[in-house]
């Protein structure tokens, strides 16, 4: 006889378990890059790029003109002393601003000094009253042959002009204009305006006044 089929019990399907929903946390907006309270206490502020690159000069305030690129200049300058652009303009609108250095003086030994204030030149210029009062800067000159007086000469900045003056020296102060080989003695204590390219002879020492603004 054929065997009877045995019934197999099939387990009932288990319904899927749905996970319990959690209550969402409240959203708090935090600006990107905002430092924490701890960082604010310990971190130094970041430097600003170029913060000191465009600081105004601290010279006396004078009246001048501004070139098309924004540089402050001598009204009589044919070219900008900073960028070299022509200063030829239809109108010259004078404005007040801090005077920049008016050039440099270059000595026969190559040493260079910026003309941003008055100078007193000599073997011992530090004892001059203007130097002691802080209105002029001393420029001691090495002179083994003693042809330079203790206080020999001075350079005076008057507005946009540079003036040379003999301070009653024993051997005199001489100047030679741009391209000129003739030495002219200065009258003691009488300031004389000099142009860029002028050479000045103090005893046996010689220096030249130079400026990016060129001759005027």
Image (cartoon, rainbow, N blue to C red):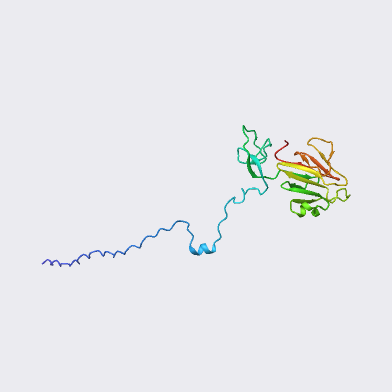
Q: Is residue 42 above or below residue 200?
A: below
Residue 213 pos. (x, y %): 70, 39
In what quadrant of the picture does the N terminus appear?
bottom left
Residue displayed at 81% across by 54% down:
127
Residue displayed at 77% across by 53% down:
131
Residue 190 pos. (x, y %): 81, 42
Apparent side of residue 172 relative to residue 78 in the rendered image (left or right): right
Q: Is residue 166 above or below residue 17?
A: above
Judging depth in this view, the residue of 3 and 32 nearest the camera is 32
Apparent side of residue 150 relative to residue 25 in the rendered image (left or right): right
Q: For the view shown, which residue lies furthest in the left direction?
A: 1
* Residue 7, quarter of picture: bottom left
Residue 105 pos. (x, y %): 76, 44
Q: Is residue 61 above or below residue 19?
A: above
* Residue 203, quarter of picture: top right
Q: For the view shown, which residue lies furthest in the top direction?
A: 90
In what quadrant of the picture does the C terminus appear?
top right
Judging depth in this view, the residue of 106 and 67 nearest the camera is 67
Q: Is residue 30 above or below residue 50?
A: below
* Residue 76, quarter of picture: top right
Residue 165 pos. (x, y %): 80, 44
């Amino acid at each position: 006889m054929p065997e009877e089929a045995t019934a197999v019990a099939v387990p009932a399907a288990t319904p899927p378990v749905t996970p319990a929903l959690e209550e969402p946390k409240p959203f708090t907006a935090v600006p990107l890059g905002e430092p924490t309270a701890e960082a604010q206490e310990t971190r130094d502020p970041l430097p600003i790029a170029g913060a000191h690159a465009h600081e105004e000069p601290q010279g006396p305030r004078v009246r001048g003109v501004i070139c098309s690129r924004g540089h402050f200049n001598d009204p009589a300058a044919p070219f900008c002393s900073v960028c070299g652009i022509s200063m030829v303009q239809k109108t010259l609108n004078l404005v007040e601003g801090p005077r920049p250095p008016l050039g440099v003086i270059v000595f026969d030994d190559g040493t260079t000094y910026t003309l941003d204030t008055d100078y007193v030149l000599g073997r011992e210029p530090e004892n001059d009253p203007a130097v002691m009062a802080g209105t002029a800067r001393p420029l001691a000159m090495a002179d083994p042959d003693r042809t330079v007086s203790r206080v020999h000469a001075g350079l005076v900045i008057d507005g946009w002009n540079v003036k040379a003056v003999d301070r009653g020296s024993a051997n005199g102060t001489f100047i030679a204009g741009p391209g000129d080989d003739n030495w002219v003695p200065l009258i003691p204590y009488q300031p004389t305006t000099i142009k860029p390219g002028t050479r000045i002879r103090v005893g046996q020492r010689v220096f030249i006044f130079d400026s990016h603004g060129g001759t005027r």
